[in-house]
Image (cartoon, rainbow, N blue to C red):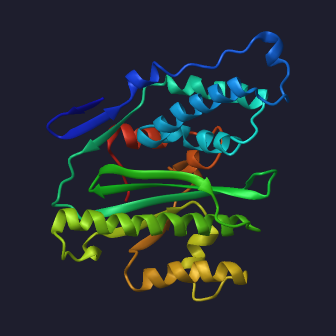
């Protein structure tokens, strides 16, 4: 559902949510928690996951991490997996929407990236998850452009390494989006750097490393940190700031049970402060 007012557009999927139902299992079957799903049950599992996935891509980033983790079990889901997936359905009925406010071009236009990671929380603590959410902002108004939740691209050995790779991914996507937005706003031959990119991380260690004259000790991580530092130096990225974890909007994209209230507020109000 899309509605347009003078100063903003809102989008929701309330009607679609009404069609998302849990997969019913008989009581005896529910007790066989480690049993693989039958072909029919697996079809129902994938169907429900597909519905949740559609929501998570369009208006519901709070479902994105759940969808990603259950999609990783597609090959051989168990009864327990199906029961857990049913548990996600209760979130669907929370009435949430996305607002796209009118941006005042008198203010400087920015692309704002919140990037976060959870170290060693996937695949029996081998892999790490990462997520980011990207906004186009002017003054206090902000329109969400995209969000993502996935696995960190390689096995990492520390929190700062996972946070760095999450930020690199978010900044890369932001630069690609800046090219599109700049052409739409200023024309084909526009100067992309008219739109600044500001990154946010809740890793104080990473934020300090990006503005330090010394190299990080981890040689593999050093290349990624220096990549960001070079882009800061040449102006491709305007700045990277530290925010406390309770202000990290990408936190719900990296872990189960994270507080979504801050992200929900920004998405539903179209307002973002202190950027």
Residue farthest top in this picture? 27
Between residue 74 and residue 103, name the one nearer to us. Answer: 74
Between residue 174 and residue 29, name the one nearer to us. Answer: 29
Q: Is residue 234 above or below residue 188?
A: below
Q: Give me the residue at 56% from left, 71% from top.
A: 207
Q: Quadrant of the C terminus?
A: bottom left
In x, y percent, where is residue 272? 36, 50
In x, y percent, where is residue 95? 43, 25
For residue 22, what is the image quadrant?
A: top right
Between residue 243 and residue 156, name the one nearer to us. Answer: 156
Asked if residue 258 shows in the view, the reply is: no
Q: Is residue 49 above or below residue 83?
A: below
Side (left or right) of 3 relative to 72: left
Q: Is residue 261 above or below residue 206?
A: above
Q: Give me the residue at 76% from left, 28% from top.
A: 37
Q: Give me the residue at 26% from left, 56% from top.
A: 139
Asked if residue 73 shows in the view, the reply is: yes
In x, y percent, where is residue 128? 70, 57
Q: Give me the residue at 74% from left, 66% from top.
A: 155
Residue farthest front in this picture? 39
Total numbered circles: 0
In x, y percent, where is residue 225? 59, 79
Q: Is residue 56 above or below residue 251?
A: above
For residue 138, what is the image quadrant?
A: bottom left
């Amino acid at each position: 559902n899309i509605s347009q007012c003078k100063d903003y557009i809102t989008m929701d999927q309330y009607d679609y949510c009404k069609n998302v139902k849990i997969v019913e299992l008989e009581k005896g079957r529910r007790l066989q928690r480690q049993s693989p799903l039958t072909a029919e049950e697996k079809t129902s599992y994938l169907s429900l996951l597909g519905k949740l996935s559609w929501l998570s891509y369009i208006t519901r980033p709070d479902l994105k991490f759940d969808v990603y983790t259950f999609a990783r079990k597609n090959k051989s889901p168990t009864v327990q997996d199906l029961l857990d997936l049913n548990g996600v359905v209760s979130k669907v009925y929370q009435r949430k929407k996305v607002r796209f406010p009118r941006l005042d071009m008198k203010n400087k236009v920015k692309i704002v990236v919140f990037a976060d990671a959870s170290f060693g929380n996937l695949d029996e603590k081998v892999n790490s998850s990462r997520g980011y959410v990207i906004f186009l902002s002017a003054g206090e108004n902000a329109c969400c452009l995209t969000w993502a939740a996935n696995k960190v691209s390689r096995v990492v050995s520390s929190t700062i390494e996972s946070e760095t790779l999450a930020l690199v991914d978010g900044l890369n996507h932001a630069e690609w989006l800046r090219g599109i937005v700049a052409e739409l706003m200023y024309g084909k031959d526009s100067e992309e750097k008219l739109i600044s990119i500001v990154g946010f991380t809740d890793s104080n260690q990473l934020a300090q490393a990006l503005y330090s004259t010394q190299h990080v000790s981890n040689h593999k991580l050093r290349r990624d940190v220096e990549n960001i530092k070079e882009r800061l130096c040449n102006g491709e990225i305007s700045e990277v700031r530290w925010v406390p974890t309770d202000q990290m909007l990408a936190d719900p994209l990296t872990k189960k049970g994270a507080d979504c209230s801050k992200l929900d507020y920004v998405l539903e109000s179209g307002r973002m402060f202190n950027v």
